[in-house]
Structure formats: C-alpha cells, structure tokens
Amino acid sequence: MVTNEKLFSVAKEYMPGGVNSPVRAFKSVETAPIVVKRGFGAYIEDVEGNRYVDFLMSWGPLILGHAHPRVIEEVEKAIKNGLSFGITNPYEIEIAKEVVSALPSAEKVRFVNSGTEAVMSAIRLARGVTGRKYIVKFDGCYHGHYDSVLVSAGSGVATFAIPGTPGIPEEIANLTFVLPYNDTQALKELFEKRGEEIACVIVEPVAGNMGVVPPEGEFLKTLRELTEKYGAILIFDEVITGFRLALGGAQEYFGITADLTTLGKIIGGGMPVGAYAGKNSLMENVAPEGKVYQAGTLSGNPVAMASGLATLRVLKETNPYRELEEKTLYLTEEISKLLTAKGVTHTINRIGSMFTVFFTEGEVRNYNDAKRSDLKLFARFFKKLLKNGVLIPPSQFEAWFLSTAHDEKVLTEALERIEKGIKEL
C-alpha cells in the first residue's frame, strides 16, 4: 500500500528536503507531511485516500476551489492546440485586457511565470526609471526569493527562524531599507533623510506572509503621499490580494492606487503565472519598447493563460466577494468561540476571504507582534486539525483562504472537525 510516509521518503531521495518549497516539509509543525493525490471543490485527498477540508487552497490561487469546471474546460481546450509556442497567443491578449480593465493602476501588463519574477522585474523597472538604487520594504513582508527582498522577510523565513539566507551578498542587502509594517512615523523619518535616493517602496497592502495583518489608518495613504513627494515608485505586491479582496484587488478595496502592481496566484487559476502592471508612462520603459530588459521562454504560456482567463471571467461574472467575506466572518467567529471555550488565548486577523489565527494575546499589527505567537501551540493545533480532516497552512505565519467552493455544508463539516481538534488540544 502506498502511504504518505513511504512516498515522502522517496521524495527526500531526489529533492532537497523532499519538497520544491520549504514550508511543504511541515518541519515547523513537527509532523510528517501528506502527499496529495487530487483536489475537488473545497477538498483535497492524499495518497492514502484521506480527505481534508482545504483552507490552504494552494496558498491562495484557488479562489474558485479545486478543479472548477470552467477552468478545467478552458485548460483542456487550450492543451489540444499545443502546450507552448514562444510566440504571442490569443489567450494572453484576452487575459491582459481583463487585468487592465480590473486593476485601477494598470494600463499595460507584462506576464511572467511567478510572483518572484514579477517582483524582481518591477523593482528593476523602478530602478531603471528613477536612476536610483535603494528600495524600501517592510519587516515580515515576503516578496519572493529574490535577493533584494529576502531581507527581514516573513513566511518561510519566519517559519525557520532565520533572518535571511546565505548567498545574498552584503552589498545587495545594504541597498534595502527595512521598516516596521504599519509604522508611518518610521516611514516619514526615512524619507526625510534619504527620500531622494529611494527608487521604490514595495509593500503587501495587506501583509499575508507574517500571517494576515491589515494596514492601519493612514499607512497606505502616507506611503502614497511620500512616494509621490520624493519621486519614488510605489509598488503594491498584490500576489496574494490581487483578485482576492475585490476584482480590483487591494487598490479597489482601500481606494489607494500604486504606480506598479505585482500579481500572481489567482491570475493563474492554479497554474504558474505572475505579472507586473502599471501606467503607460512606466511600462513603456520595458523592452522591447524601452531599455529595461525582461524576458521569459514560458511567459504568456497559453495553457496557463487559459486557466487564468477562465478564473478571472468567472470572478467578473459572479462577483463573489461580499459572500466570501461573510462566510469568512462567520467561520472566524465560530473558531474564536471554540478556542475561547477551550481557554486558548488567541487573536484572529481577518480581511476579505483570508485570515490567520494567532496564538497570542493582544493585537497583531506588525511582525514583532506576530512573532509573539506560541509556535508550539500552533504546531499542536495544526496536527489535531490534520488528524481530524482539516488542512490549514503548516506555518503560523501564513493565511487561511476560503473559496467559492466553501459553501454552508462544507463550513458546517469543517467546524465540526475543527471542534474535535480543539477539544483534543
């Protein structure tokens, strides 16, 4: 019989740690990982046949759930015409139109293959346009594994309790200023001292990789005002929030417009896709129109574009955002009641259809607050939920996601399973 343990032991023989992304090894939750065979709707199934209510949702892309019929149909249609051309195809033109029409700051978009590529390209563009070299990011915000932004990052780096990674030269790290998230005063002080040297500020408009931490008060507004005043480029990393909070992402949700936006996850509908978008005045500097170079053999891949296009069109037609937010509110309130009844100290941060359960008291408004969480308790919580058929992110510093497939029946089942897990803590 094939088991998760046996198959993962084989994986470790051929892949570092048995995975292609560190957090999948489940090391921070101190348990053996599962190996997934298939996904359907709001569920996944491992190779042993165990079924789980899925709140990981592939780390965010699957806002329509697993194997949505419209997405599968469009992908199958695309596959029959060929897997890759290396030449412009109709799907990428159509999805570009959808992105530009939805995103408040976008007049042109360039597709790449991941969020990391999108961030790397957007920062290069900002440096190329401004002629400046320094960038600003925020402590605990994760923008992919690109050297310039893997400094005081959250997510996997936080999970493994290391400040960065070997392999990044000090000279590169020194070109990045790191500030506390939600700290407008620190932001103002930096710009007063070094504003004329700053090429760009990159920020998750809702932090999702220190756990979910929404922006406070004037934080995003201050970012917009300072970057405009000093001629720096404001980059919203909407790899998570793009098409998640609203059709126009966090920029529509908060009414604050960035200069450049990086996208990923949902725009691929489960396929590997990233993008960066902005006004013509910036995007005209990208090759072949301009001198800022970026290229990719599989960028605009027709199968990935078909998957993303089908996803965006379903979202546009159904506009599920209010219903998703209401379901998320209900779920988080019920989880909080269960934890309170058990006497477990916790804080839940929620926005739209994403949330994090922090095992700490008091507000979580930045990375330092998030790091106060009881990681041992989170690991026990994760294991009890997994045992009872609920999959959540195997890291305290990640978001739970809901999809349109998480209907009332699924949520009722999930809460019954979560209640069993909490009682076993």
Image (cartoon, grey):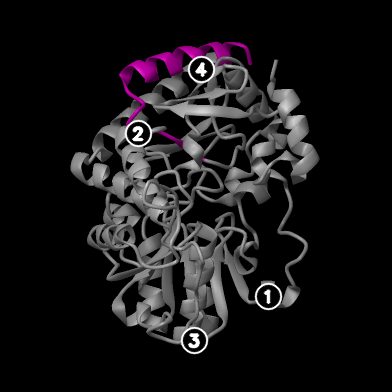
Q: CA distance from mark 3 to mark 2?
A: 48 Å
Could you classify mark 1 by the number of other residues whose Cα lies within 10 Å: few (under 14), some (14-19), or many (20 or more)? some
Residue receiving disc 2:
68
Local packing at callout 4 (Cα closer than 10 Å; few below 14, some 14-19, many 20+) is many
Q: In which quadrant is the C terminus drawn?
A: top right
Q: Is residue 216 visible?
A: no
Q: Secondary structure at mark 4?
A: helix
Residue hosting label 3: 196
Residue 86 in the figure: left or right of residue 8: left
Magenta part of the chain: 399-425
Spatial separation of the CA atoms under disc 2 and disc 4: 25 Å
Q: Nearer the viewer, mark 4 or mark 3?
A: 4
Q: Mark 4 sits on what residue?
A: 418
> Looking at this view, is 73 or 358 the one in front?
73
Where is residue 139? Give x, y as percent: 59, 58
Count of labels shown? 4
In which image quadrant can residue 145 be found? Answer: bottom right
The numbered dot on residue 172 is 1
Observer able to see residue 102: yes
- Residue at 37% across, 39% down: 63
Q: Work out whether mark 2 precedes mark 1 in sequence or the reverse, and give the earlier one.
A: 2
Q: Amino acid at mark 4?
A: Ile
